[in-house]
Amino acid sequence: MKGIRIIAVLLALLLVSSCARGLLRKPGLDTYRSEPTISLFDNKTGQKKKIKLEEYLTGVVAAEMEPSWPTNALAAQAIMARTFTLENIAAGRVKRLHGTDVSTSVEEFQAYDPSRINDNVRKAVDMTRGEVALYNGQYIKAWFSACDGGVEASAREGLAYVKTPTPYINAGVRDDCLTVTTPENKSWRAEIPLERVRAAVKEIVGNDPGPVRSVVITEKGPSGRAVKIRVNGVEIGGPALRLALGSDTVRSMLLEGVSIQGENLVLKGKGFGHGVGMCQWGAYRLAQNGKSPEEIVKFFFKDIEIRDLWK
């Protein structure tokens, strides 16, 4: 009987231990004891290979930000990239496409270019080794953009994202990125043929709006971005129209002028990107001012924790 009681106690302890581990492994947050090796799909060659996660991140940071930038800005980008990578691996998005954890496609995952890696990038990734950004124990949506035009947007405003709550986005925070960014981000102008606008609206709503006679912003978000735009009598989302027209052409939805001139839609604005999360030029400025990588990330994301998953 004594032996049976001991076995029962051991089984109970194992059950408690197992449950505790289960609680640690929250949905979307894997518990790591060491740096993982991940699988990478090369979209150019079609090849698959195994790679250490930190090594993979050097190729991401080098592609997503200028390798010559201040180390702390690159390191903040590394925290973003590491968080984005693990959150997406947990969701299995690329696994469903290629059977791998990640891919080299910026459309499918994030930019990756190992040819741009230098010592500055390696140092930035190494100094934040294992660091991820969490909110209530879950990976944040590690969004970033090139230049937020000086003010950060909410997820709804900049990306039309409402699928899950994102209270950690520090919407409205001002980073003065326009004082350090390139001239084309401070002020840009785009001329878009009206027929292309017509085709974009049809692509979004599925119906032909007819020859474009009028384009009006009908709703702006708190940061000033165009959230809703009416083309003729059809109202569509600003972020959706930007993507349909080309995000390099319509550099942002922080529009300062909308008009029809001849056969073109003329847009004037500032910034480059959706403006949600970390602004890369804002990170550049904060790094210049001596902010640490963690301070930079916490400037753009509020009430978050930065945790080391491995060393």
Image (cartoon, helix red, strand yellow):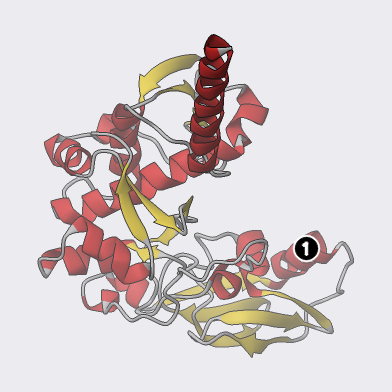
Above or below: residue 124 compared with residue 302: above
Task: Point out residue 134 in the picture as x, y percentages from the top left corner.
Answer: 41, 54
Horizontal side of residue 95 vs 140, given as left or right: right
| Residue under label 1 | 204
Regarding residue 69, the answer to whether it shows in the image is no
Above or below: residue 238 compared with residue 259: above
Of 233 and 148, nearer the camera is 148
At x 67%, y 29%, the residue is 96
Of 291 and 20, nearer the camera is 20
How many numbered markers are drawn? 1
At x 47%, y 59%, the residue is 136
Quarter residue 290 falls in? bottom left
Horizontal side of residue 171 vs 238, given as left or right: left
Quadrant position of the N terminus in the picture: top right
- Residue count near mark 1 (Cα–Cα under 10 Å), binned few <14, some 14–19, many ≥20: some
Regarding residue 185, the answer to whether it shows in the image is yes
Task: Point out residue 143 in the picture as x, y percentages from the top left corner.
Answer: 46, 58
At x 33%, y 81%, the residue is 174
Task: Point out residue 52 in the picture as x, y percentages from the top left corner.
Answer: 34, 23
Quadrant position of the C terminus in the picture: top left
Dot 1 lies on which element? helix
Task: Point out residue 133 in the picture as x, y percentages from the top left corner.
Answer: 37, 53
- In the picture as drawn, the residue positioned furthest to the front comes out as 1
Quarter residue 193 falls in? bottom right
* Three-letter amino acid code of the residue under disc 1: Ile
Horizontal side of residue 173 vs 289, given as left or right: right
